[in-house]
Image (spheres, grey):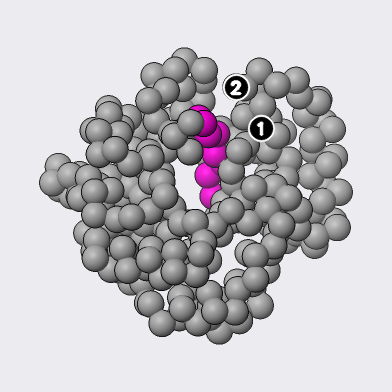
Amino acid sequence: MKNKFSYMLAPIESMTDSCFRTICRGADLTFTEKVNIEALAKNNEFALEKIKLYDNTPCQIQLLGQKEEPLKKFLANFTPENGFKGFNLNLGCPDPAVVSKGLGCAMMKRVSKINRLVHIIKDHNHNVSVKMRLGLNQHEKEKKVYLNLINGVDADFFIVHARHGKQNYSEKADLSVIKECIATGKNIIANGDITTKSDIEKLRDCAGIMIGRAAITNPLIFAELKGIKTPPINEIINEYLELAKKRNAPQKYQNNILRRIQQN
């Protein structure tokens, strides 16, 4: 990864399913929506559908959870599909329903636990990354729990969303922290308010960048940022609709995506 600057599509609930991931031309890596580890271990049909990869679009499966035995059980029976590039641990979700269970960004201080999960995945010969925030709140950001996590965990790369868990998207991401994250010597992917070539040029010391909301309104943003010729957006919308029909995408997902793309 150190030799290649990667462009990644962020996982967004009820939007970035396999259909949307496929139409994001130019994205080097995509991620499934978060999926509960215990649900996967129990072969929950809805959870298994979320991690189904329909084509060769490069994708990591994002896992939410903290229990080791269910993770081992799931991995023991897991068979990679085409396009599978590893697993991602969700340590960034700020949803109160998730945080109240000690998951998402509420897990960030549990470095030993996180590292055990990472090594369970590595012991099954899979790549593993971490998606994180700057902490659960401003206090944790000031205590630099994000640096403790990066320094103490053996993941292949760390996606740093430069907000803490109490901040909403109207508050600007603090990308100034990325420099000290890079100084750890680990592979760092910057995330948060990155939409232009100018934004990216300021982050060239990273291993890459991740884009979420801007890609929802313009799934061709990755190709455009790379200078790759793109088809008309109407063709992309038609492709998305065809994929959604073929893969039985929930109508809610289609509505969420089409409403935002057509606003572009």
- Image coordinates for residue 177, horizontal then vertical, percent: 26, 33
Secondary structure beneath disc 1? loop
Q: Is residue 39 visible?
A: no
Total labels drawn: 2
Looking at the image, is 14 positioned above or below residue 262? below
- Image coordinates for residue 220, horizontal then vertical, percent: 68, 30
Q: Of 1 and 11, which appears nearest the observer? A: 1
- Image coordinates for residue 95, horizontal then vertical, percent: 39, 58
Amino acid type shown at disc 2: Leu
Q: Which residue is mark 2?
A: 225
Q: Which residue is at a point 76% across and 53% down the rendered structure image?
A: 55
Residue 11 belongs to the span the image colors magenta:
yes
Residue 34 - label: none
Looking at the image, is 122 positioned above or below residue 228? below
Q: Of 96 and 113, which appears nearest the observer? A: 113
Q: Which residue is mark 1?
A: 26
Looking at the image, is 110 positioned above or below residue 209? below
Disc 1 packing (10 Å; few <14; some 14–19; many ≥20): many
